[in-house]
Image: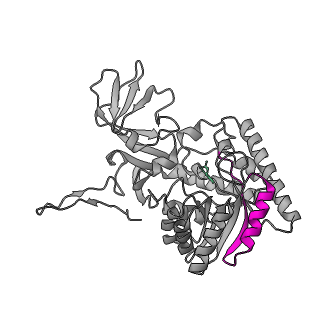
């Protein structure tokens, strides 16, 4: 697919017509890609996507991957082609490029506050099946009004807090009151429960994650039972991320999982302990170049804070096992690399591949994702939902 920004046209003054050449073109070698650029190893990416779909299919559970990780319609289409039932987005505006790309079923796995966002949602619902979360009757009222004005129908999930302490009602009676509230409005349909435990995803040991996931599932199951006792069928229980998926699939409570990061496996997720049968590979890299070899024991890369998120740690450097290069500090536009004792220092202009600590906010820094196969650029995919956080 053609890139959204094949070249950037700068403002023209006094007849100056200057274009920034694209960072990558299909057919180029990886070494020719300009830096810093966001790189996708297509072989590893495809294995990750296939593996998650196979896990969900084997368990008979619907896979609705989270698009907040990639913000890229081409990736969403690849997930749908393999059997995903739809996607999740985290913000109403984030869904827009996916609706434009023809994704017909989008769950906003988050609460929206206020009429402006409810109106964006109602506008999306003219073109796709849209669902959204609530944990407060005022959100229900704003959605009902926007749906009535736009004459559309939106499906509403009640979010329950299953351990994260973020959004979601904390008890079954509060959930029941919201379901009753939703039922009052003809433009709203109760879809089920969302039960997502973000705090469980990055606990390093599988035992800790299994325990946290079991507690989340037990809490969700109790709310389902409470609703059923009151005559409210709960068709869907959605939730779960990359770190808890193997337990959510076996829980008997979730009918749908919404992992996102598995397509990339960032540096932070790489530090989790994985079941080899459910592990995923690093597919996402930042191509960065050595811009200075002036310091005696270090080299300086051209990728710093403006090229990657470091909230989950500094990037790792892709190198053979035992490689002694360490990315030790990120400045705005510089990355400082220590070269261990006896290690050959990379030369000026040499390209290094970095594994970012946290994929989601890193993707949000780039317009394009450069797909590589066998060392060559195969595609350049727009990160079309980049910056859409309303
Ligand atoms: C509600 C919700 N669902 C799913 C996910 C996906 O989680 P992960 O990227 O860890 O797979 C997230 C991520 O933060 C989330 O907030």
Q: Say above or below: 346 vs 128.
A: above
Where does residue 151 sit, x and y in percent of width and height? Answer: 60, 81
Quadrant where the N terminus sits is bottom left
The residue located at (39%, 24%) in the rendering is 339
How many numbered circles does the render carry?
Answer: 0
Magenta segment: does it hold 247? no
Can residue 85 be spotted in the picture? no
Residue lying farthest left? 14
- In the rendered image, is residue 260 in sight? yes
Q: Which residues are magenta?
A: 170-198
With 63 as the anchor, is 329 left or right in this view? left
Name above or below for residue 154 compared with residue 279.
below
Residue that appears at 32% across and 52% down: 23
Q: Give the percent coordinates (x, y) of residue 94.
A: 51, 62
- The image shows residue 296 at horizontal and vertical percentages of 30, 20
* Residue 34 falls left or right of residue 330: left
Left or right of 259 in this view: 91: left
Dividing the picture into quadrants, the one containing residue 2 is bottom left
Residue 53 position within the rendered picture, expressed as x and y whole percent measured from the top left: 65, 57
Please tell me in which quadrant of the rendered image residue 333 appears: top left
Residue 9, image quadrant: bottom left
Give whichever of 251, 156 is nearer the camera. Answer: 156
């Amino acid at each position: 697919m053609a890139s959204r920004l094949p070249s950037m046209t700068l403002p023209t003054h006094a007849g100056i017509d200057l274009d920034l050449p694209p960072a990558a073109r299909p057919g180029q070698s990886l070494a020719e890609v300009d830096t810093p650029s966001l790189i996708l190893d297509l072989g590893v990416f495809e294995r990750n996507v296939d593996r998650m779909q196979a896990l969900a299919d084997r368990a008979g559970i619907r896979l609705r991957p989270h698009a907040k990780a990639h913000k890229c319609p081409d990736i969403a289409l690849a997930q749908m082609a393999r059997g995903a039932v739809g996607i999740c987005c985290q913000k109403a505006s984030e869904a827009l490029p996916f609706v434009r790309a023809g994704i017909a079923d989008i769950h906003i796995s988050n609460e929206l506050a206020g009429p402006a966002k409810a109106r964006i949602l109602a506008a999306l619902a003219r073109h796709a099946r849209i669902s959204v979360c609530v944990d407060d009757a005022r959100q229900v009222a704003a959605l009902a009004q926007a749906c009535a004005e736009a004459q559309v129908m939106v499906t509403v999930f009640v979010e329950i807090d299953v351990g994260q302490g973020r959004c979601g009602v904390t008890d079954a009676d509060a959930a029941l009151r919201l379901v009753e509230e939703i039922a009052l409005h003809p433009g709203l349909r109760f879809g089920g429960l969302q039960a997502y435990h973000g705090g469980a995803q990055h606990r390093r040991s599988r035992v800790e994650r299994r325990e946290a996931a079991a507690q989340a599932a037990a809490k969700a199951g109790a709310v389902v039972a409470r609703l059923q006792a009151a005559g409210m069928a709960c068709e869907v229980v959605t939730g779960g991320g990359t770190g808890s998926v193997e337990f959510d699939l076996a829980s008997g409570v979730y009918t749908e999982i919404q992992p996102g990061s598995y397509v990339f496996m960032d540096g932070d997720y790489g530090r989790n302990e994985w079941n080899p049968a459910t592990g995923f590979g690093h597919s996402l890299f930042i191509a960065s170049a050595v811009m200075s070899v002036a310091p005696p024991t270090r080299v300086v890369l051209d990728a710093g804070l403006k090229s990657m998120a470091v909230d989950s740690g500094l990037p790792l450097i892709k190198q053979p096992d035992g490689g002694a290069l360490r990315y030790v500090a990120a400045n705005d536009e510089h990355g400082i690399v220590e070269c261990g004792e006896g290690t050959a220092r990379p030369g000026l202009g040499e390209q290094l591949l970095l594994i970012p600590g946290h994929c989601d906010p890193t993707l949000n820094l780039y317009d394009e994702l450069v797909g590589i196969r066998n060392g060559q650029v195969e595609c350049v995919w727009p990160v079309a939902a980049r910056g859409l956080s309303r």
